[in-house]
Amino acid sequence: MKQTVKVDGMMCNHCASRVEKVLSLLGISEIVVSLSDKTVTFEDNGVAIEDAKTAIIDAGFDIFD
């Protein structure tokens, strides 16, 4: 199922790569990071959205609605 999360604190390609890496370590695929929209869209592959959000927060970013 496709999920979109708004992420605060992503400012550069390094930030985007960090978010992609932590999500891919969970088994999440098809990750698309938009720095301009401050969003991450991905195919969750059965991973709970809360686990994905926790991984992003643990990587040093904030989630907002």
Image (spheres, grey):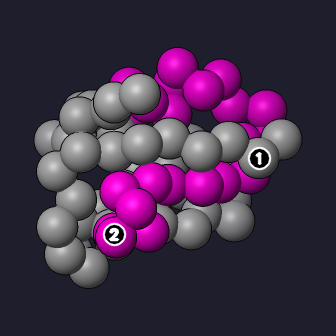
- Closer to us: 54 or 8: 8
Residue 21 is at least partly visible in this image: no
Discs 1, 2 touching: Cβ within 8 Å: no
* Image position of 28 with respect to 33: above or below: above
Instruction: List x then y, in percent, for residue 54.
Output: 38, 26
Residue assigned mark 1: 2
Figure check: 51 above or below 16: above
- The magenta segment is 34-55
Give me the residue at 68% from left, 42% from top.
3
Asked whether 50 falls inside the magenta stretch, the response is yes
Crowding around mark 1 (Cα neighbors within 10 Å: few <14, some 14 to 19, many 20+) is: few
Amino acid beneath label 1:
Lys
Residue plotted at (44% across, 68% down) = 34
Give residue 35's mark. 2
User: Considering the image in quadrants, where does the N terminus appear?
Assistant: top right
Indicate the quadrant where residue 6 lies. top left
Looking at the image, residue 19 sits to the left or right of residue 40; the answer is left
- Quadrant in the rendering for residue 56: top left
Residue furthest bottom as drawn: 13
Can residue 45 be seen here? The reply is: yes
Name the residue at the right extreme: 1
Sequence-wise, which precedes: disc 1 or disc 2?
Answer: 1
**Residue, x 41% and y 28% (percent of image)?**
65
Mark 1 or 2: the one toward you: 2
- The relative height of residue 29 versus residue 1 in the rendered view (above or below) is below
Image location (x, y in percent) of residue 14: 21, 75
Q: Residue 27, position in %: x, y? A: 64, 48
User: Is residue 38 one of those drawn in magenta?
Assistant: yes
